[in-house]
C-alpha cells in the first residue's frame, strides 16, 4: 500500500519571496511533488535562519533550472545526486548560477532604471551602516552587521524590493509606507517612485537596534 506524502501549505513568506524574485512561474512548472517537498522542507525549519537558508537554496535551484534538493534535474526526468553515474555535475559558471557578489547581481538587472535605483538604495544603506558587510544571502544582496543579516534588496519584473527582514520593523515604519505596496517584511518601489532616504535610514537603524536587543 502506497503512503501519500502529506500536503504542505505554502508559507506566506515563501510566496512573497517567489513573487519578488519573479520565480513563481518556474516554481509552478516543477512537478507537484517537488513543489510540496520544497515548501514542506522550508516551513519545517525550526530556526528562522534555517528557513531562510533553505528558501535561498530553492530560489537558486529554480533560477538554475537544473537542480532539485542538490540533485541534478531535467524536466521530465528523475532527479539524481550530482556526480552519480550518468549525470553531469552542475557547473558553477552556468548561466543560472547564483551571482558571486552584489556587483554581479546588479549586473544581471537588465533594466537600467532598476539597476540605478538599487545602486542608490545600496548607497543609502552604506551611509547609515558604513561597517556593514555586503553578501549574497537568501538569494539576494544583503547587508550584514556584526555577523547578522540586516536588510536586503532585490529586483523583480514589475518592481524593486527593500527587505527589512523583520515584520516588526516594517510595521513600525507606519505612515512612511503610504503609497508603497508591502509584504510582511518588504517594501516595494519603482525607479519612478524611489524610497525616501529618511525611510531607509529609519528602517536600517531600527534593524540594528533590533539585532542588538536579541
Image (spheres, helix red, strand yellow):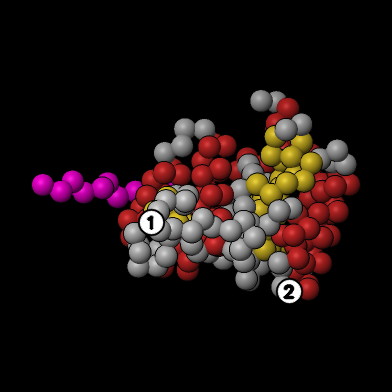
Q: For the view shown, which residue lies furthest in the top direction?
A: 214
Frontmost residue, 64 versus 147: 64
Cα distance between the residues tagged 1 and 2: 34 Å
Determine the residue positioned at 81% across, 54% down.
Answer: 122
Q: Quadrant of residue 75?
A: bottom left
Element type at mark 2: loop
Q: Which residue is mark 2?
A: 111
Q: Which residue is mark 1?
A: 79
**Part of the protein shown in magenta:** 1-11
Circle 1 Cα neighbour tier, 10 Å, few/some/many (<14 / 14–19 / ≥20)? some
> Could you say where residue 184 lies in the image, as x and y percent from the top left?
57, 49
The answer, for residue 24, to whether it is visible in the render is: no
Left or right of 135, for residue 53: left
Number of numbered discs on residues: 2
> Could you say where residue 156 lies in the image, as x and y percent from the top left?
63, 66
Determine the residue positioned at 75% across, 54% down.
Answer: 102
Magenta-drawn stretch, dominant element (helix, strand or loop): loop
> Could you say where residue 142 lies in the image, as x and y percent from the top left?
71, 47
Q: Is residue 56 above or below residue 64?
A: above
Amino acid at each position: 500500500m502506497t503512503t501519500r506524502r502529506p500536503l504542505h501549505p505554502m508559507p506566506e513568506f515563501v510566496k512573497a519571496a517567489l513573487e519578488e524574485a519573479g520565480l513563481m512561474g518556474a516554481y509552478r512548472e516543477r512537478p507537484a511533488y517537488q513543489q510540496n517537498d520544497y515548501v514542506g522542507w522550508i516551513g519545517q525549519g525550526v530556526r528562522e535562519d534555517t528557513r531562510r537558508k533553505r528558501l535561498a537554496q530553492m530560489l537558486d535551484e529554480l533560477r538554475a533550472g537544473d537542480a532539485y534538493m542538490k540533485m541534478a534535474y531535467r524536466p521530465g526526468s528523475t532527479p539524481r545526486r550530482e556526480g552519480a553515474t550518468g549525470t553531469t555535475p552542475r557547473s558553477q559558471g552556468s548561466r543560472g548560477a547564483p551571482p558571486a557578489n552584489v556587483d554581479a547581481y546588479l549586473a544581471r538587472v537588465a533594466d537600467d532604471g532598476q539597476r540605478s535605483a538599487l545602486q542608490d538604495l545600496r548607497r543609502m544603506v552604506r551611509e547609515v551602516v558604513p561597517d556593514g558587510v555586503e553578501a549574497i544571502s537568501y538569494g539576494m544582496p544583503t547587508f550584514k552587521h556584526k555577523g547578522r543579516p540586516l536588510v536586503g534588496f532585490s529586483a523583480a519584473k514589475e518592481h524593486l524590493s527593500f527587505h527589512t527582514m523583520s515584520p516588526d520593523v516594517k510595521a513600525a515604519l507606519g505612515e512612511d509606507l503610504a503609497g508603497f505596496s508591502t509584504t510582511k517584511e518588504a517594501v516595494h518601489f519603482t525607479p519612478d517612485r524611489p524610497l525616501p532616504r529618511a525611510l531607509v535610514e529609519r528602517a536600517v537603524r531600527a534593524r540594528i537596534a533590533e539585532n542588538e536587543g536579541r
